[in-house]
Image: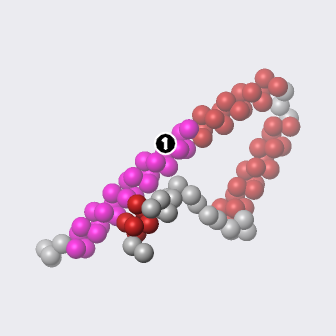
């Protein structure tokens, strides 16, 4: 099936990222989770609430950043394809 068919049928999910738990990204996530758990255990209730607020703000910023990176990458890919498919050669 062609990518446009897959996209139309809802089978393309660019925001989903699959990774190996044993890979570099998986190990980095595990280390971050362990550090966060250790930090959380050392905080009082007010500090935990502040940390939770920080996490929420960081997730929102990450979503915005990921969207802009995706959009920028898609545009760059389209520009590359336009250049590749153009007949003009330098």
Which residue bears the numbered disc 1? 64
Residue furthest out toward the front? 9
> Is residue 14 depicted above or below 60 in this figure?
below
Q: Residue at x 28, y 63 (%)?
A: 79
The crowd level at tag 1 (other Cα within 10 Å; few <14, some 14-19, many 20+) is few
Query: 72 left or right of 86?
Result: right
Q: Residue at x 50, y 49 (%)?
A: 66
Quarter of the image with the N terminus in it: bottom left
Residue nearer the viewer, 7 or 30 = 7
Query: 60 left or right of 53?
Result: left
Does the magenta run of residues contain 82? yes
Residue 73 falls in image quadrant: bottom left
Q: Residue 9 at what x, y percent from top left?
A: 45, 62
For the question of whether residue 90 can be seen, the reply is no
Q: Residue at x 46, y 48 (%)?
A: 67
Residue 24 falls in image quadrant: bottom right
Q: Residue 35 at what x, y percent from top left?
A: 78, 47
Query: 32 left or right of 87?
Result: right
The majority secondary structure of the magenta stretch comes to helix
Q: Residue 61 at what x, y percent from top left?
A: 54, 39
For the question of whether residue 22 can be seen, the reply is yes
> Is residue 82 depicted above or below 59 in this figure?
below
Query: 23 left or right of 47?
Result: left
Magenta residues, start to end:
60-85
């Amino acid at each position: 099936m062609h990518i446009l068919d897959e996209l139309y049928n809802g089978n393309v999910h660019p925001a989903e990222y699959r990774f190996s738990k044993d890979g570099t990204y998986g190990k980095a996530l595990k280390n971050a989770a362990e550090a966060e758990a250790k930090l959380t255990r050392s905080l009082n209730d007010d500090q935990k609430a502040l940390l939770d607020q920080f996490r929420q703000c960081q997730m929102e910023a990450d979503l915005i950043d990921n969207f802009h990176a995706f959009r920028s990458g898609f545009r760059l890919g389209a520009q590359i394809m336009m250049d590749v498919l153009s007949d003009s050669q330098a």
